[in-house]
């Protein structure tokens, strides 16, 4: 008799792409397994007229999914790792982090090829505090406006002429086959990515060995080291959606290089630092980087 696994997912096109991706991979790995999607609406999907930083942060995108798991409606939940708060609620854990897609930010415009081409005072859409502080540092003349909604909604707002350009994640555009809309891939030097950007994670009920055995073949070890290093930095900084924090790790020859950034939108202050070490110390490195940023004054500028 076939076993059934239920995936809790948001209803947005990108969330459904991610859930279907996990479903397809699991069914290919386990022919005896039937995977079903349990589509849910979260508060983050419902409240679109306020920046996330003012209504509770990115955790609003996953709470209902966790409730569904706790009540037995679903066995696992699939998330964008950049939406997963640094504190996982009691009773849950990250069971797998999949191979990372392009982690960088994308400049999207119908009339301009890159940020430098934008005229003085151009209207740019994003609701990310991290993107805003880095964009302002580069182009203080730009008018930066809030932009909420799923990828398709944001692109429509651009096409309707509400903005001269918008900033999105490359990963979402690539996954939804909008790669041709990317006019400029913004390098990590120009805009350090969000913690976990481009990676998909699977949340499970804590100590669920049976589920963990099913999903463990999906784990990408290098992505896991990178993302856990970034998340360890974010946790030590106690960073949520309401503060501009960025973290991006790369790996070369078993060495992990982690760059972290904290900023303040009001003052324009940005602190940035980098650490390196063996991949086996990924989380320790993240904490060490956070400590260094705190020594540089991160706590003070994050409170302003």
Image (tube, helix red, strand yellow):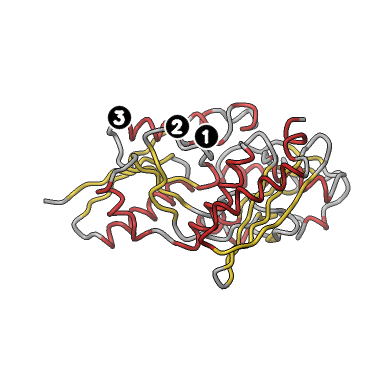
Foreground pick, 19 / 277: 277
Left or right for 77, reference 249: left
- Residue 202, given in percent of the width and then of the height, sits at 40, 48
Inspect this view and state whether residue 99 appears: yes
For this orientation, the residue located farthest to the left is 1
Q: Residue at x 74, y 37 (%)?
A: 145
Q: Which residue position holds label 1?
A: 59
Residue 33: image quadrant is: bottom left
Could you say whether the residue bearing mark 2 is in a helix, strand or loop? helix
What residue is pinned by disc 3?
Answer: 71
Q: From what the image shows, is residue 179 above or below residue 294? A: below
Coordinates of residue 17 in the picture (x, y in percent): 43, 51
Q: Residue at x 60, y 56 (%)?
A: 170
Quarter-of-image position of residue 57: top right
The image quadrant where one finds the C terminus is: top right
**Numbered tag placed on residue 63 in the rendering:** 2
Crowding near pointer 1: few (<14 within 10 Å), some, many (20+)? many
- Given residues 173 and 227, the one toward you in this image is 227
Contact (CB < 8 A) between labels 2 and 1? yes
Q: Is residue 110 above or below residue 250?
A: above
Q: CA distance from mark 2 to mark 1?
A: 6 Å
Which comes sooner in the sequence, label 1 or label 3?
1
Residue 34: image location, x then y, percent? 23, 51
């Amino acid at each position: 008799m076939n076993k059934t696994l239920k995936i809790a997912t948001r209803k947005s096109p990108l969330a459904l792409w991610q859930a279907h991706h996990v479903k397809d991979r699991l069914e290919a790995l386990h022919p005896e397994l039937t995977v079903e999607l349990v589509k849910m609406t979260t508060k983050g999907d419902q409240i679109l007229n306020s920046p996330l930083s003012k209504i509770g942060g990115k955790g609003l995108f996953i709470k209902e999914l966790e409730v569904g798991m706790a009540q037995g409606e679903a066995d696992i939940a699939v998330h964008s790792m950049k939406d997963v708060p640094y504190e996982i609620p009691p009773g849950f854990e990250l069971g797998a982090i999949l191979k990372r897609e392009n982690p960088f930010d994308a400049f999207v415009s119908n009339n301009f090829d890159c940020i430098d081409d934008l005229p003085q005072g151009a209207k740019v859409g994003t609701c990310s505090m991290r993107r805003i502080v880095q964009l302002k540092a580069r182009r203080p003349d730009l008018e930066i406006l809030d932009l909420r909604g799923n990828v398709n909604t944001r692109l429509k707002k651009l096409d309707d002429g509400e903005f001269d350009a918008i900033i999105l994640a490359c990963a979402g555009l690539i996954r939804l086959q909008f790669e041709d809309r990317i006019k400029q891939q913004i390098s990590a030097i120009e805009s350090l990515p969000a913690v976990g950007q481009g990676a998909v994670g699977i949340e499970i009920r804590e100590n669920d060995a049976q589920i963990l055995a099913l999903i463990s073949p999906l784990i990408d070890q290098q992505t896991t080291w990178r993302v856990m290093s970034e998340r360890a930095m974010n946790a030590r900084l106690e960073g949520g959606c309401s503060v501009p924090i960025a973290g991006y790790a790369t790996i070369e020859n078993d060495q992990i290089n982690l760059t972290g950034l904290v900023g303040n939108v009001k003052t324009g202050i940005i602190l940035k630092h980098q650490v390196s070490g063996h991949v086996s110390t990924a989380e320790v490195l993240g904490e060490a980087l956070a400590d260094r940023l705190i020594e540089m004054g991160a706590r003070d500028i994050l409170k302003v």
